[in-house]
Image (cartoon, coloured by chain):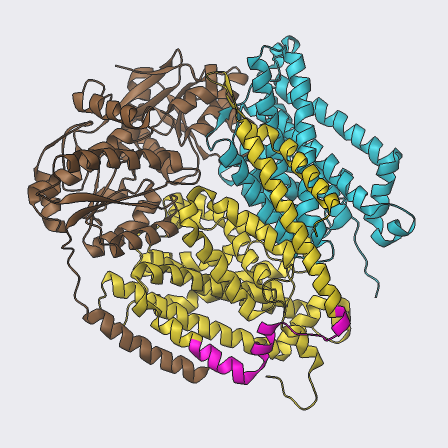
Chain colours: A cyan, B yellow, C brown
Amino acid sequence: MDYFIELFFGGLTRGSIYALIALGYTMVYGIIGLINFAHGEIYMIGAFTSFIVATVLSIYGFPLLAIVVIAGLAAAVWSSAYGYTVEKLAYRPLRNAPRLAPLISAIGMSIFLQNYVLLAQTSDFLPFPALIPEFEFMEPVAHIVGSSDLTILVTTAFVMLGLTFLIKFTKIGKAMRATAQDKTMAVLVGINVDRVISATFVIGSALAAIGGMLIASHIGQINFYIGFIAGIKAFTAAVLGGIGSIPGAVLGSLVLGLTESFATGYVSSDYEDVFAFSLLVLILIFKPSGLLGKAETKKV
Amino acid sequence: MFPVKELKRSALISLWFAFLTFPIMVIKVDPIERTVNWRWDNLFFVALGSFVVSILAKVYLIRKERRAGLKKVSKAVTEPFVQRILREPRFLYPLSIAVLIFAISFPFFFSTYQTNIMTTALMYVVLGLGLNIVVGVAGLLDLGYVAFYAVGAYSYALLNLHFNMGFWAVLPIGGLFAAFLGILLGFPVLRLRGDYLAIVTLGFGEIIRLILENWNEFSKGPSGIANIPRPGFFGMEMNFDSGITYIYYIVVALVVFTIFVVNRLQSSRLGRAWLALREDEIACQAMGIDKTKTKLIAFSLGAFWAGLVGVIFAAKTTFVNPASFTFLESAIILSIVVLGGMGSIVGVIFGALILILMPEYLRALSEYRMLAFGGILVVMMVFKPDGIISNVRRSYQFKKHSSTAE
Amino acid sequence: MRSGLKKKMFVAAVALGFAMALPAAGFAGDTIKLGVAGAQSGDLASYGLPTVKAAELVVAQYNANGGINGKKVELLIEDDVCKPEVATNTATKLVTDGVDVVLGHICSGATKAALPIYKEAGVVVMSPSATNPGLTQSGDYPNFFRTIASDDAQAKTEVDFAINVIGAKKIAVIHDKGDYGKGLAEFAKKFIENSGKAEVVLFEGVTPGAVDYTAIVQKIKRKGADAVIFGGYHPEASKIVSMMKKKRMKTTFISDDGVKDDTFIKVAGKNAEGVYASGPQDNSKNPLSTKAIADHKKEYGEDPGAFYENAYSAALALLNAIDKADSTEMDAVVKALRTENVDTPVGKIHFDENGDAVGVGFAMYQVQNGQYVEVK
């Protein structure tokens, strides 16, 4: 039973990280219908920024709490800035272009950002400072659930609550929902769609940055390539849950994380990803719009 | 001529980029030695660079607007120059013969190395044309195309290893295997729409690669299969140079064959069904087109070509391992199709030549090569979202009653 | 179009005839061309660039002494990014440029893809780092040599150490699904099973770059392994080691040459303490090795990188063989490599029938106070 609980929590942690990234995918997709392949890179840049800032601060002798707060803020700010800029440079000019053009632009952006960080920083793996302390009250159960797992779970939960509130009750949240439903109609009722799209990128990027910082601190290392695999997994999770749906992205991520964890634990890690993708195919065969996606009926 | 307002705007842009790139470009920390290296000169270069680029972009946009304004006045619907040439048989035939002669004489004028690179590029032309059937013509976004390529390559490697089968025998088998797999995959997934299809095909591509990586007894795992023979020519032994040249000619022949088939297909009943399906599925069904069957054919035909090229790939490198069949490969093939111009054969050819030859000749830039590659993809898409040569097919719908279909 | 096709086939056949008629060109140049091929850009560049530097230093030294039999040595440096399909292009380019011998390639996969091309062109190849056993033991590549011991020798060292020194009874064998890591892990598994003294409780691969490795670490714990043998590179190793520390596990971690890298200690930090890794024998008492490292520091102002000494030795061995054979013909060079002993930073070596260097082996190291120390 211990083993099951361990795997369960491991899967939840993994799923939470996927969720933080998947939200960015799903929000962008919900609004402009674009698979933002560069989103994984935004996550990587967030992690890198927090790495740089945290290391600088620790060299200058700041206390841990200050480092965590400032590095987290810096990661969110710069990731958002990157998200905003990428949208403006690579996607906005293509708003009315053929459907696949923005996708290729996104793939190009992803390759560009990866190599930009590679060249500006390094190709080596770097040690990420331990930003999450080992809590003493966790010591008795540390062999099952670590402090960083707990921190990740709690942070993710809070972020989700905050996001739900933002989408449900604030003005920009309402504008986002309206735009997702019908872009033309949103313009007619006086919503500045461009601004809503920018806001979506900014929020999604900030979430990814938080995810990046948490996971890098959890595994203790970072390099320029971490965004690619995490991005693909998170995207899978978003589709699994029904792309465009925010609760769907969270559910899909948790399901994916748990599947991977149990597949490794009870079967074999050799085929961990095969399980993940097979699950995706299976679910989509029976529910073609994902777990919580709305089945679209097209009128003629 | 250049307003101050624009200069101010460019200055703001350059400030923004200086801010944006600040942590990554300027600060370099060494967490072991615990030192910080502030590279302020980078900040200056970024600011200056973005200032200049933003001004250049603005100048380009102003010019473009002015030109667009002029065009509106003249009101003539001008077809792009390239397309006009392509439509006129009296230009097209001499041109294609000239290209063919160039292609055939290529190995005589260039070194073996150049021939080898050109072979690679031409293989991607075929891959691009194959994917073009799926994505460009039938409108099914396939992100796992590389899986079929892998199936072809491993068919040859394994059939040769276990049953000692030759290149020519496996060539059609590899293609058929891939096509069969395409149908197998197509059945369950083709009822998914657009982007769901994309992710499932992506997942499928990864599954194939992972199986090749993990199932040692079947595929020899990540260490791959070496010593795959090159194609034989009536049992003649060939030295290295002529071997390369020979494969080059095989690929040229395949390119010609592919262009011929794809071109004929597009004007066929099936091809028109694909186009219709891409434009509007529901209307298509109402017209009595069997949606599933038509999609399946597109999917498996695309896969067939990937399988053929896979066999050639294995014969050319004489070595296969799963590392050659990653998602990035699918992305590059897709980029070829979109960059060249979806649905356009000539566009895909250009796309493949540019995208595959560019990194080879950018070798001088070495480490900046991939950065440039990514940047060029974005810039190309932003300025030419329809691809280099945009869809020629569109003119097909307005054919005059006197002319017959090509 | 159809007639074009037919014509083309005809022309192709004629062209082929011409190409076959061309005699195999002999490489009688005024210089001896030493090709250097390997990853010089991309994520594996750090494994390939030190080889380039080693070649530059050795060649500069030879040329300063008047070259080989009056001929200067010229370097041809080509990048293969460690990808098999690029490696064939690289090899073709080198052969087209008339290369005489090649130092490279760096990765086993790329080497395997490139070797047939060199073999047909009659070019001797010596790798400082390609450790796949098949390269030498299959007997397919008579033109291939290397100055590093093969994976099976390394796996043997690790397994002997785990069983005889640590006394492990239950061993988990983990790999990174890669060419190098998985190959090594399979040998380790085989040796453990053959020894009869310990059992393999787990044999699995992890996905490089995956978000975390909690699940596999839990599995290692559950299987009650008292030692882990990991085949792969340092990023995955440091993730697994850190995760094991987080789970408060005390399992011994044994790994390979890909982990015996100072970057591992830097990244894993204090979690690296106590980790064992096999690596090339310590050559610090060899004066040639000291000199090679000193030269590198003088020329480039930093310590040499991975496989530097192996590459330095390979360059010396190749040029020495050409010198002794007084020819660049494959058979003569091969014969010289097999018979002539040469003093190199990795010891006094010659090569056996398969192409492996005789006298090059592995030793075990342990991380102690942030440094790899050889375990006697």
On the picture, is C239 further left or further right than A49? left
On the picture, is A189 further left or further right than B401? right
Q: Residue furthest bottom?
A: B402
Q: Is residue C352 visible?
A: no
Q: Is residue C170 visible?
A: yes
Q: Which residues are magenta?
A: B72-98
How far across and how far down the image is residue B52, in percent? 61, 44
- The residue closer to the viewer here, B265 or C81, is C81
The picture quadrant where one finds residue C354 is: top left
The picture quadrant where one finds residue A46 is: top right
Please tell me whether residue B267 belongs to the stretch shown in magenta: no
- The residue closer to the viewer here, A162 or C163, is A162
Q: Quadrant of the C terminus of chain B?
A: bottom right
On the picture, is B63 further left or further right than C90? right
Please tell me whether residue B84 belongs to the stretch shown in magenta: yes
Q: Main secondary structure of the magenta part?
A: helix
Residue drawn at 55 percent across, 48 percent down: B374
- The residue closer to the viewer here, B406 or C364, is B406
How far across and how far down the image is residue B175, in percent? 46, 66
Residue drawn at 50 percent across, 77 percent down: B260
How far across and how far down the image is residue B337, in percent? 57, 61
